[in-house]
Image (spheres, grey):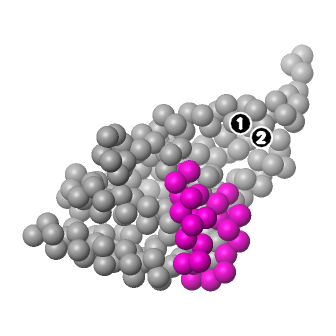
Amino acid sequence: MSDATPLSHLEQQLNFLREIDQLKSVVRKSPLIDQSRKENSAEHSWHLAMYALILQDSANTTVNIDRVIKMLLLHDVVEIDAGDHPIHETGDTSAQEAAELQAAERIFGLLPEAQGEELKALWLEFEAAETDDAQFAKSLDRLQPLIHNVATQGGTWVEGQVTEPQVQTRYGQVIVKGSKALWQHAKQLVAQHFKSQQ
């Protein structure tokens, strides 16, 4: 039997907030638009929340923007344990999904139970991408790196030798589910980019 005093509600919340500071150290493949360095996952999550705030009128349907922003702030927290896995890398997706679920259990488990379960449910909803809110959130998660790649003369596409048809498939199919308008614009940017590379 443990003599340890259970953590208070506030102590659990502060433990979670200290833990997610590690997301600032998870470096992504995507460069900043000024190309001075690669972005980290915390910056990516913040930027996506801003995309949602600014672009909410481009969603295919009316979305609950508060829920969308929460999903985007939470969606990469699991990378603290599971790492970042760019869409252009191949690998065992089932192993990655299992690692991310285990990370979600641990990290959201630091919070008071009801709050942790609520946030984990939002993370799971984002991953499943079946609701309008989650589909719009997912579309922005694809749009932001696309915008960065176009703005940096190809960015990760050049590094990964990604073709225009691959971009159409890997980005387009996800973006269009959340926002046909954003994909219409992004598709033009992609076409212009690849035409300029010929």
Provide residue 179's location: percent of width, then percent of height: 51, 79
Q: Is residue 51 magenta?
A: yes
The image quarter in which residue 157 lies: bottom left
Question: Is residue 130 visible to us here?
Answer: no
Secondary structure, magenta segment, majority class: helix
Which residue is found at the position 53% from the left and 58% from the top? 48
Q: Quarter holding the C terminus?
A: bottom left
Q: Answer with left or right where residue 180 lies relative to residue 71.
A: left
Q: Amino acid at mark 2?
A: Leu
Provide residue 80's location: percent of width, then percent of height: 54, 38
Provide residue 158's location: percent of width, then percent of height: 21, 56
Disc 2 residue crowd, few under 14, some 14–19, many 20+, Cα 10 Å: many
Which residue is found at the position 56% from the left and 33% from the top? 22
Q: Are marks 1 and 2 in contact (CB under 8 Å)?
A: yes
Which residue is found at the position 77% from the left and 40% from the top? 111
Q: Is residue 156 magenta?
A: no
Question: Which residue is identified by label 2?
Answer: 111
The magenta stretch is: 45-70
83, above or below 59, in the image: above
Q: CA distance from mark 1 to mark 2?
A: 6 Å
The image quarter in which residue 165 lies: bottom left
Q: Amino acid at mark 1?
A: Phe
Foreground: 119 or 67? Answer: 67
25, above or below 186, in the image: above
Label 1 SS: helix
Question: Which residue is identified by label 1?
Answer: 16
Q: Answer with left or right where residue 8 lies relative to residue 59.
A: right
Provide residue 193's location: percent of width, then percent of height: 23, 69
Foreground: 85 or 97? Answer: 85
